[in-house]
Image (tube, rainbow, N blue to C red):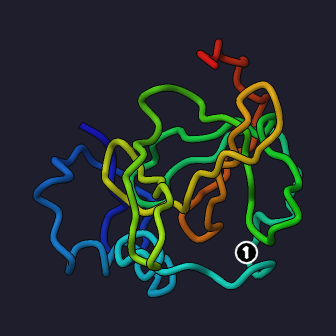
Amino acid sequence: MGVLPMEDNDLQYKDVDYSSVTDEQWLRALTPEQYMVARQKATEWPYSGKYCDFDGDGKYQCVCCGNDLFNSSYKYDSETGWPSFWDVLSDDSVDNVPDDSQGFRRTELVCKRCGAHLGHVFKDGPLPTGRRYCVNSLALNFVEGPPAEFRQTNV
């Protein structure tokens, strides 16, 4: 079980079964903008997100459930207008889902714990993975601290 912010954006957390969380509960736990991106698959405007040009040491977590997603050391400037990472923190961080919603095939990036829409992953990133995880700032929380250890990637 993961965590879900309590009502009215209170940062107290509790264990939950994410398959049973209702839209009404998400609406109480998230800002309207976070809800539109993370739960309704909207996209924030390029260069508008608070983490686009942010450069702190720590980790990025899912705004909905607190799942650890990205190491700050994996972040790079892709010049696309969204925070971009070349890898995820662990195999438990995200799932890749086929997305044909724009009339062409791309890969949606969702939180593996709660299913939140994070952004998309593309195969035009830097080595060692060659991937660009293009993520909406509204889908993230940043936790300051020493960057997590680099994980071994299976490239």
Which type of secondary structure does the marked residue at label 1 adopt? loop
Residue at x 74% of width, y 43% of height: 144
Considering only vertical position in the picture, is 110 above or below 51? Answer: above
Q: Quadrant of residue 5?
A: bottom left
**At which x and y percent is residue 18?**
20, 52
Q: Quadrant of residue 98?
A: bottom left
In this rendering, would 126 be left or right of 142? right
Q: Most extreme residue toward the left, as rendered?
A: 20
**At which x and y percent is residue 20?**
10, 58
In this rendering, would 66 be left or right of 57? left
Q: Nearer the viewer, residue 26 or 70?
A: 70
Q: Quadrant of the N terminus?
A: top left
Residue at x 54% of width, y 64% of height: 139
Residue at x 55% of width, y 41% of height: 69
Q: Quadrant of residue 30?
A: bottom left
Q: Nearer the viewer, residue 33 or 41?
A: 41
In this rendering, would 34 be left or right of 3? right
Number of other residues with Cα within 10 Å of mark 1, as a class: few under 14, some 14 to 19, many 20 or more: some
Q: Quadrant of the C terminus?
A: top right
Q: How many circles with numbers are drawn on the protein?
A: 1
Which residue does the numbered mark 1 point to in the structure image? 49
Considering only vertical position in the picture, is 4 above or below 1? Answer: below
**At which x and y percent is residue 12?**
39, 55
**Residue type, mark 1 in image:** Gly
Q: Most extreme residue toward the front, as rendered?
A: 104
Q: Nearer the viewer, residue 19 or 101?
A: 101
**At which x and y percent is residue 124?**
75, 48
Residue at x 44% of width, y 87% of height: 32
